[in-house]
Structure formats: C-alpha cells, structure tokens
Image (cartoon, coloured by chain):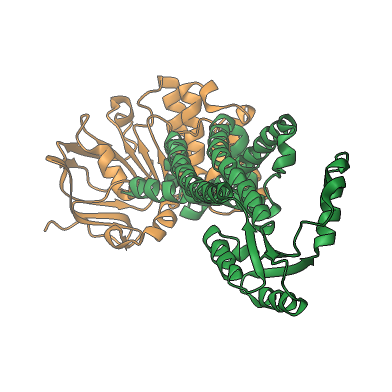
Chain colours: A green, B orange
Amino acid sequence: MKRYMKRTVKDFTSHAFLHSITVVTIALTILIAGALLLVVENGETVIASWKNGVRIMVYLKGDAGSAEVTEAGHSLETMGGVAKVSFISRDEALTDLMESMEGQVSLFEGLGENPLPDAYEVEVTPEAAQWDRVKAMAAAMMRLPAVDEVEYGRSWLARVSRLLGMMELAGIALAGLFFIVALFIVYNTVRLALYSRRDEIEIMQLVGATGAFIKIPLYLAGVMEGAMGSILALVTLFGAYALFAAGAGGGADAFPLSFLSLGSMGGVILYGIFVGWFGCFLSLREFMKEASS
Amino acid sequence: MTQPDNTDEAVIRLFNVSKRFGAKLALSNITLDVHKGEWLYVTGPSGAGKSTLLKLFYLGEKTTSGQVLAFGTNMNRLAPRDVPFLRRRFGIIFQDFKLIPNRNVFENVALVLEARGEPQNMIDKRARNILRHAGMDKRMEAMPTSLSGGEQQRVAVARAIAGQPDVILADEPTGSLDPRSAEIIIGLLSAYHKKGATVMVATHDRDLLARKQGRIIRLEEGRLVAAEPVTGGRA
C-alpha cells in the first residue's frame, strides 16, 4: 500500500493541473450543496426555537372558586402535548405588568381594583407545537369550567412555521439534488482525466500490469480528490458564512446563526470521499471495459 | 486443416487463424509455429497484417477464428485475470515507442518491474543495469520528449527486456529511425536473442531483411504467402 500511496502522490504532482481541476469541481458542487445544508440547519434551529417557545395563556373566570382553579390546573397538567403548567396569580400578573411598563406608573394610579384575572401559563411540548394541534388544545382548554379565555400565538406564526417547513423540505431536496449533480460532474471529470491518460494505462496493460496495479492508485487519487474538494468547500463556505454573520449585525440577534454541526461537516467530507471514489469506480469500470474490448 | 511444423520447441502456435475487422479480412487462415530461441522476420507490404499478427500473441487483438497457443496456453480460453501474467512473458516494442511521456527514462523502464511487484532495490539495480547496456545511463533522468527517436527506441528496447521475457515482439522497431540508430536497436535485440530469447520482428525494411539474420515469413493481404523453413534460428 505504501508503494501505491507513493505512486498516487507522485501522480498528483505530475498531473497537478488535472487533479486541481477535479478538486475544484468537487469543491464547487459540494459548496453549493453545503450552502443549502447550512440554510436548512439554521432554518431547523429557528423552527426548533420557535417550537420550544410555544405557550398558551389560560385566563380564569373572576368568580372561579379555589377548588375549580386547582381542578383546572390538574386538567391542564394531564392534557396531551403539555410540557409545563405555571399558575400566575392576578397580583403577580399586575406586578409583572407594572414592571414591564416602568416609567408609566401613573397609568396604574387610578386603577383601584386589580382588573387582571388569575391565569395558567401552559408550555407546549415541541412535538405538539403545530398550529392545528395548538388550536385543538386551546379549544379543549376553553371547555374547562373555570376558564374564561384562552390566548395562543398568532396566525402569522403559523404561516411562518409552514413557510420554514417548506423551506426545510426544499432545502433538503435541493441539497440532495446537488449532491447527485456533484456525483455526475465528478464522474465526467474523472472520466475525462482517465481518457487523457489512456495511452499510459494502455502501456501499463501491455507490460503486464494487473488491474489492481493500475486501479488502486487511481482510486486513492479519487478518494484524495474527494477529501480535498470537500475540505476546500467547507473552508470556503466557512469564510462566506463568517462574512455574512459579521455583516448580519442586529439580524443575528433575532435569528442566532451557527455554522454546520461537526456531524454535518464530517458527513460532507465523507460524501466528498464517496463522490471521489464512486466517480472513479464508474469511470474506471467503463474505461477498463473499453480498454479490454 | 493445415498442420503446423512438428516440433516440441514451439513457443507460439497458430492454427488456421483468421482476423476480421468489419468487412476487412486482416488475417486469413494462418498456420504457423514460432520456435524457442528463433529470430523471425514477418514481412510484407503495409496493411498486409503484420502488426495484427503480432497483436494476437499478446492479446492486443483476439482471433475471429482459429486457435493461438502461447507457451502451451490456448489464448481463446485465457481468463482475463491471467492476461497480465501472459503478457509478462512478452517484451513488446512499437514503431512509435509508446513511452509514458510524464515519466522519465528510468521510470519508464522500472514500470515493468514495479508492475510485477519486484522489490525496490532490485528494480533500481536492474533498471540501471539495462539502461547502461542500452547506452542510456547518462539520460536516466531525461523525459522521453527530450530524447531523439533513436534514444526513445533504445529506452523502449530496455523496457521490453527489463522483465526478461521469453519472446520479444518488435513491430517496425527501426521504421522511424536513421540507419545508425537502427543498427544500435538491432544490436541490442541481437544481444538479448543470444541469451536464448525468441525474437519476432515485423518489418518491411529491406536492409534488415538482407542481413539473413533469421527466418522470414511474408504476408500479403492477410495471407501467409511465403515461409522459409526453420534452420536453427540463431543469429
């Protein structure tokens, strides 16, 4: 294997231009697919953070007795899709409101009696954080005797959720498509590279070189090209991401951006290696068939 | 069916061999024995089938009909995985040299030994030795494109004999060379032939044929029209 490695490295230096073209081609196609993957991953983070933040406010009737209030709390806790239930008394609610409207305390001066009702804050599990499900949960909560009013999200959030979901699907589909495109581009590039070395391979066959002697360095070259191409793509993508994240400014606060996860980066590199190997496999199979016919 | 010469010393035997390329019949019903240690010229006009005949021996082409036996092996029944091992018993020389352009002189010769998995120290020693015999030891680092035609053919001969094959197949080895370079090439082949190898040279070079160095067979339009009897074979 050491001898094959040596031949592969030597081949890289003697066919530097040819190998560079293949590496850059792999890098470009993986860059596009990687960029889509980055969008999908960040989109998923946004959706996940929104789903984690879904809450339903359940306002209780002013004349509800303490037994009814406790009963409503139990019912909410045992309801499907509920992660956490917190009781907020009308006094706590007023204090919170006054704190949030600091500087406009005069508004509360002539208030007399506290107009706010007791309430339960219901946190929805991420799995249940879908518009239709939340709507159904809210309807069930409304049917509890102590409940006066239920407030949950806004319809635009539902639309954003649906849009992100569609983006996620489209992103995955596009990334998959570009990965397939990468495979075919690499296959053609490797095939062209092999054709340019047709005479060399023919001479090797004539001097009694076995298939393994001819193919192993070409496979190693394919794997190296794939690894180098995907690493180049990741470095370029990180550069572009860093520039974008720096320029995004305030936007970055609203949607915290992150680069590809370690798992995804490993996946991209493995995919690059696979593309290099598989492109080589397909081209060599066709080429050797032609050469021996 | 015509019977070939009756000898146990035949390294290659052809029985009623024909080769067709589409509508063109390149070789027609050839029966021939090539004996161990003989020097054989295959002559005839361009397009007579000389190169095609040589290609059949190392499976550069397959027969359309008939049988080719090389070293007792029927080439029609040889498994693809065994072809490289058969080819190692042949040293092949071409008119256009067929050197690998991005490998230097030493590497072109060493390739034959690398392909056989020989140890590196043996490869170095033998390749240098052969190149010294070929008078190319001072140009071992040179790339093929920087060499003259005669020098390139010397490297090609060195490559052909590096693996110590049983048979040398030379297709117009002097066809594109000046008389002095041609003399050197034939000298190198003769030296290897004297060690006991079989040499087959396809040529229409009258000067070579005039040497009366070995047996001459003549092809015309794919047919064997004249074959001298075997007379011992050595140059």
Front residue of B66/A121: it is: A121
Tell me if residue B161 comes above or below residue A15 in the rendering.
Answer: below
Residue B205 percent location from the top left of the image = 30, 27
Quadrant in the picture for residue A82: bottom right
Residue B55 percent location from the top left of the image = 31, 44
Residue A189 percent location from the top left of the image = 46, 37
Quadrant in the picture for residue A228: top right
Tell me if residue B75 comes above or below residue B178 in the rendering.
Answer: below
> Is residue A3 among the parts visible in the rendering?
no
Q: How many marks?
A: 0
The residue lying at 43 percent from left, 39 percent from top is: A188
Asked if residue B78 lies left or right of residue B191, the reply is: left
The residue lying at 75 percent from left, 40 percent from top is: A253
Q: Quadrant of the N terminus of chain A?
A: bottom right
Residue B31 percent location from the top left of the image = 19, 52
Asked if residue B170 lies left or right of residue A124, the reply is: left
Asked if residue B157 lies left or right of residue A147, the reply is: left
Front residue of B175/B23: it is: B23
Tell me if residue A70 comes above or below residue B109 in the rendering.
Answer: below
> Is residue B134 among the parts visible in the rendering?
yes
Front residue of A126/A246: it is: A126
Front residue of A206/B37: it is: A206
Asked if residue A106 lies left or right of residue A76, the reply is: right
The residue lying at 38 percent from left, 32 percent from top is: B173
Quadrant in the picture for residue A31: top right
